[in-house]
Image (cartoon, rainbow, N blue to C red):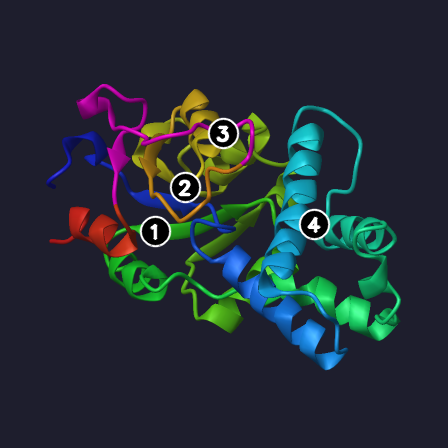
Amino acid sequence: MPNPSLEGVEALIFDVFGTTVDWRGSVTKELEDVGKKYSLPDSSSDWAEFANEWRTGYIDNTRRIAGGGEGSGNVDIMHREILEQMLSSPRWSHVGKVLDEDARVHLNLVWHRLNGWPDTVEGLHELKKNVIIASLSNGNVRLLVDMAKHAGIPWDVVFSGELFGSYKPNPATYQGALKHLSLTSTPHKAAMVAAHIFDLRGAAKVGLKTVYVPRPDEEWHPDDVKGRVKSKAEGGEVDAVVKDFKELAKLFSD
């Protein structure tokens, strides 16, 4: 194996939103379609801001709940709550005025219809020849299953914070995945793969190896690191940094 830091890894556990799928591009495109359907005047930059605001609400809520706060354990419910708040706000009320209940239900399920990054499906198919590939997302189970079918993502197993009663980076989520992979006593045989340093830090705290995959504009939240993430070999904090899933697959090829 070219990277000795990952020697002995039997399972790769993947973040989904942003790491495996392009939520920003997918949601923005669907919002643009909504704008055209209802003849709304907003530009594509406005729809990108709508998508970012929706995503920010999700991140803020999941991190708060992960830290012990109150809130829904189902992201579909959370997304709908955030959407309703946005559509009743001064900024987006003109959108809310034209969307009836059916339209709102359909729009809320856009998170089930996210597209993978260009390297995602090919890279995961290569990886699963040699290691277990699993999701570990804050998205609820049905969302993740629908998304996998939509995007052709070949997970061996789908893990969700919904199954473990919390959200990442609560240790219970990573420990739950390790338990079901029979790796509780050997967490170093699993590696978390993510485009978010907070997620990798959470995984490392319970003993998982960590792989950072930079994705466009993913380290954008105020609590996340700015600048290039480095591997331990470069004096950084993660075990490996790869440009995409296809490069990661080469580390596990025979």
**Residue positioned 83% across, 56% down in the render:** 87
Is the C-beta separation of discs 2 and 3 under 8 Å? no
Identify which residue, 24 or 10, lies in the foreground: 24
The amino acid on which the numbered mark 2 sits, given as a three-letter code, is Ala
Q: Is residue 46 above or below residue 61?
A: below
Distance (Cα) linking label 2 and label 3: 13 Å
Q: Nearer the viewer, mark 2 or mark 3?
A: 3
The percent position of residue 246, horizontal first and vertical second, equals 24, 56
Disc 2 is placed on an element classified as: strand
The amino acid on which the numbered mark 3 sits, given as a three-letter code, is Asp
The percent position of residue 69, horizontal first and vertical second, equals 76, 27
The percent position of residue 205, horizontal first and vertical second, equals 44, 21
Q: Is residue 79 above or below residue 40?
A: above
Distance (Cα) linking label 4 and label 1: 25 Å
For marks 3 and 4 on the same chain, the one whose residue lies earlier in the sequence: 4
Distance (Cα) linking label 3 and label 4: 21 Å
* Disc sitting over residue 224 in the figure: 3
The answer to whether one can see residue 99 in this image is yes
For marks 4 and 1 on the same chain, the one whose residue lies earlier in the sequence: 4
The image quarter containing residue 30 is: bottom right
Which residues are drawn in magenta?
221-242
For marks 3 and 1 on the same chain, the one whose residue lies earlier in the sequence: 1
Disc 3 packing (10 Å; few <14; some 14–19; many ≥20): few
**Residue positioned 39% across, 24% down in the render:** 207
The answer to whether one can see residue 146 in this image is no
Identify which residue, 185 or 252, lies in the foreground: 252
